[in-house]
Amino acid sequence: MADFIRVILSVIIPPVGVFFKVGFGMHFWLNILLTMMGYVPGLVHAIWILASKE
């Protein structure tokens, strides 16, 4: 259920879903940058991070 909520949050605001997965790490800041460059790159990166098994 937590993964489902992360995906929903990532679709709405991509950095929030990444934050709940990795915290204030490099991926979070990269996702903010990508989201500022365009919604789709940030969304793709967020889904990529959520789908990874790290």
Image: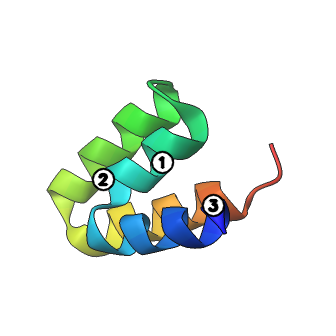
Which residue does the image show at 61% across and 54% down from the upper left? 49
Please name whichever residue, 31 or 24, is drawn nearer the observer in this view of the structure: 24
Residue drawn at x 43%, y 74% as measured from the top left: 8
Would you say 45 lies left or right of 9 here? right
Q: Give the structural element (helix, strand or loop) at label 1.
A: helix
Q: Which mark is residue 34?
A: 2
Give the mark nearer the N terminus: 3 vs 1: 3
Q: Measuring 27% from the left and 62% from the top, which residue is drawn there?
A: 13
Q: Quadrant of the C terminus?
A: top right
Left-right relation of 33 to 21: left
**Amino acid at pointer 2:** Leu
Location of residue 46 in the rendering, given as x and y in whole percent from the top left corner: 48, 60
| Residue 23 placement (x, y as % from top left) | 50, 29
Q: Residues within 10 Å of mark 2 (few under 14, many from 20)?
A: many
Foreground mark, 3 or 1? 3
Give the quadrant of the N terminus.
bottom right
Instruction: Say if mark 3 contacts mark 2, CB within 8 Å.
Output: no
Mark 1 surroundings within 10 Å by alpha-carbon count, few (fewer than 14), some (14 through 19), many (20 or more): many
- To which residue does mark 3 refer? 2
* Disc 2 to disc 1, C-alpha distance: 12 Å
Asked which secondary structure carries label 3, the reply is: helix
* View extreme (right): residue: 53
Residue at mark 3 to residue at mark 2: CA–CA distance = 24 Å
Dot 3 amino acid type: Ala
Query: Mark 1 highlights which residue?
Result: 18
Tell which circle, 2 or 1, labels the residue nearer the N-terminal end.
1
